[in-house]
Image (cartoon, grey):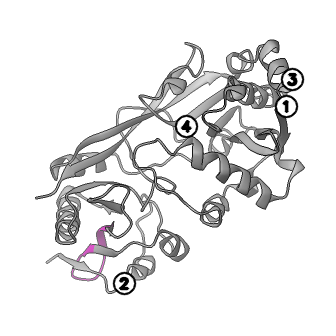
Amino acid sequence: MRRVEWLAAPDDLALLPTPGDWPGVDAEAIARQAPDASVVMREPRGELVARASVWWRRQPRPGVGVIGHYGARDDAAGTAVLRAATARLADAGCTYAIGPMDGTTWERYRLALPGSDAPPFLLEPVQPPAWPAHWLATGFDVLERYRSDRAPLAVLEAREPEAVAARLAAQGVTITSFADHAPSEVIDAIHAVSIGAFAAAPWFTPVAAATLGRQYAPVVPLADPAFVQLAWHGGAPAGFVFAVPDLLEARRTGRPPATLVLKTVAVRPGVRALAGLGGLLLARVAANARARGMHDGIHALMRDDNAKARAFGAGAATTIRRYALYGRPLA
């Protein structure tokens, strides 16, 4: 008979073989994310059929617990583990649960929703299509909605009016690339901008630069200086765009990638002199990508109610995937 059990330590989760269509959970990620406890369901012979971790000590809001590291082979296993996770959070004093989220929004979170036949792109969270139904069956509702849009790079490049570029330059804004700095300087600049740019986002949790650096570590080797642009104003980092070619597309087609994945575009908030900087940074990387023979850009994982995200592509964008984050009250 299957059984649900709490592991002696969350570190033990990394020792369990992960089914091939589940996101991996390794020892480094667990150490960085620091879950408070992990629960699994196993077959009598020890085969993993479901898992989850919970966080209640580090809360994105008072009373809110987090469920992450989610995986399940079938509906029954998934709902059993989610019920165990919500009960543990309630016992810890939480009044609300959100997930899936591996601790914070700086880590893997959300589920891709079924209904799209677009192939996965690099850095996109993918999982078996049945998983969203497990959360709904356990009393969760959609809390936040996200999407990824595709648009022609030519449209993004055209968003750079010469007047905007001239005005920003006159106000002391300069733009450099990844190649102009040591990797640690790039991470520090990304951290400084992100902490301000995303502070008002739902479920935001501050993070140290070193933690962000460890998260970016797998992506930095893929970075091309043409696609990592940094803006500076008054001697301080003012904005950045971090984009990577879609290497999954290249693997599928056997040709150089024709798509650029825009992982993050952020500008330091509250500075009037920076108006138009995000569009300028997008235009710069779009021009660089077009010079490499690329055609499309994917703005990845945008919140549905983000006005700037809705403006992506100037009416020429197509939504290729939707995602959800779930939440529910706890008794």
SS for dot 2: loop
Q: Position of residue 330 (x, y in %)?
A: 15, 57
Q: Is residue 41 magenta?
A: yes
Q: CA distance from mark 3 to mark 2?
A: 56 Å
Say which of 74 and 274 sits in front: 274
Question: Decide: marks 3, 1 in contact (CB < 8 A)?
Answer: yes
Q: Position of residue 262 (x, y in %)?
A: 64, 37
Residue positioned most to the left: 331
Question: Decide: marks 4, 2 in contact (CB < 8 A)?
Answer: no
Mark sitting earlier along the chain (1/4): 1
Q: Which residue, given by chain and number where applicable, does mark 4 sit on?
A: 300
In this picture, is 180 found above or below 35? above
Using a 10 Å C-alpha cutoff, classify the residue at mark 1 as few (fewer than 14 neighbours), some (14 to 19) or many (20 or more). Answer: few
SS for dot 4: strand
SS for dot 3: helix
SS for dot 1: loop
In this picture, is 13 found above or below 89? below
Left or right: residue 74 compared with residue 289: left
In this picture, is 295 found above or below 138? above
Task: Classify the position of the N terminus by image quarter.
Answer: bottom left
Mark sitting earlier along the chain (4/2): 2
Residue 323: quarter of image? top left
Q: CA distance from mark 4 to mark 2?
A: 34 Å
What is the three-letter code of the residue carrying label 2? Ala
Is most of the magenta stretch helix, strand or loop? strand
Residue 271: quarter of image? top right
Q: Which residue, given by chain and number where applicable, does mark 3 sit on?
A: 170
Q: Which residue, given by chain and number where applicable, does mark 2 sit on?
A: 9
Q: CA distance from mark 4 to mark 3?
A: 31 Å
Q: Which residue, given by chain and number where applicable, does mark 1 sit on?
A: 172
